[in-house]
Image (cartoon, rainbow, N blue to C red):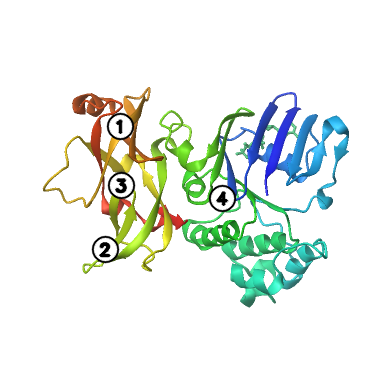
Amino acid sequence: MQLELSLRHDFGSFDIDVAFTAPKGVTALFGPSGAGKTTVIDAVAGLLRPQHGKVVANGDVLLDTAAGVFLAPNRRRIGYVFQEPRLFPHLSVRSNLLYGQRFAPRAAEGQDFDKVTAMLGIGALLDRRPGALSGGEKARVSIGRALLSKPRLLLLDEPLAALDAARREEILPFIERLRDAGLPVLLVSHSIGEVARLAQTVVLLRNGRVVAAGPAATLFADPSLAASLGGAEAGTVIPARVAGTEPDGLIRLDTAGGPVFVTDAPTTPGTALRLRIHASDVIVSRTRPEGLSALNILAGHVRRIEADPDGRAFVEIAIAEGQSILSRLTQRSVAALGLAPGVACHAILKTVALSRDDLGAA
Ligand SMILES: Nc1ncnc2c1ncn2[C@@H]1O[C@H](COP(=O)(O)OP(=O)(O)OP(=O)(O)O)[C@@H](O)[C@H]1O
């Protein structure tokens, strides 16, 4: 499944001109408020009829202004989950879910009622009304309703924004499962942590234009994009695999740059994970440090350095072919250490800095 989109529209006070391709998996639209994220997904859903544009989902043309094609929203087979779950308050959870199912084409592939309710953990809620659900439960029901319409593509517009951290943590694994089940997802999110955890592809928007688009790991490792992709919360995502539990309880993850020890992670050896490493949690040493309490020392070399206007810099450290992590240092440290592209160095991470939030399913 692949989504190709080009879109030009002038609202008068704001004009948007974007084009990108979303391969299968989760594609995140990221950017500041007013960048045009919702406008893009509204055009995909058919809620906006742009002045110029083309939307092709797996070869099916949903919109082509040049050819006069505009498929009505209900014929696009797209599931749209809004920030606030728009459930029918007078209907039970079961009836809300069945409402989604009414739109599913008979022959369409997709998961059936029992599978969806089991996957989202909402089987016990079926006879309740939405008013008697928590925010996280409502979000799951609204994702379930969208899934039961057997969409070819799921649009998630800030589905977790209204939830607290605990409820978010409740939903994230379900979105990971959708991704793993192969359903393409276009996700709008303000949270760089969420994007890092879920997205394989990132489209960075600003002022109605695409600033950068491509594989998430590549964009996150680009120091020149770090200010836009999180700023103080910027970080990279690297693959990791659970090696086992140490006698002292720490869990060893193997990465291409060496072992990383964490306190909270799945313990089944062999489990593949995505490990997010915050740039501000990484310090850099030219020599391999001795007598240091931090256990996580990854060897690599400097690839790129990008200075900030505020006296700091993002340093990209390559730890393996195609894998980098970022460190956020003061420019003074960069100079004192003599860091420059090609210089060998060690990236040091504190074990306690690596929390469960930073580990996602691969
Ligand atoms: N129907 C409309 N008429 C006029 N302007 C509009 C319309 N819809 C959106 N806009 C403008 O387009 C711009 C982009 O809006 P959009 O909702 O796509 O941004 P966004 O990136 O989703 O922002 P946020 O993160 O705040 O939701 C905004 O300046 C908005 O005011």
Quickly name the residue at label 1: 302
- Look at the picture and state if 107 lies above or below 315: below
Q: Of the numbered discs in the image, which one, if any, rests on residue 257?
A: 3
Quickly name the residue at label 4: 161
Separation of residues labelled 4 and 2 (CA atoms): 32 Å
Q: Position of residue 144 (x, y in %)?
A: 67, 64
For discs 3 and 4, the disc positioned in front in the rendered view: 3
Give the image quarter of residue 102.
bottom right
Viewer-nearest residue: 183 or 256:
256
In the image, what residue type sits under mark 4? Answer: Ala
In the image, what residue type sits under mark 1? Answer: Val
Quickly name the residue at label 2: 250
Q: Earlier in the sequence, mark 4 or mark 2?
A: 4
In the image, what residue type sits under mark 3? Answer: Gly
Badge 1 residue CB within 8 Å of ligand 1: no
Q: Residues within 10 Å of mark 4 (few under 14, many from 20)?
A: some
Q: Earlier in the sequence, mark 3 or mark 1?
A: 3
Q: Earlier in the sequence, mark 3 or mark 4?
A: 4
For discs 2 and 3, the disc positioned in front in the rendered view: 3
Viewer-nearest residue: 182 or 144:
182
Question: What secondary structure is found at the residue carrying circle 3?
Answer: loop
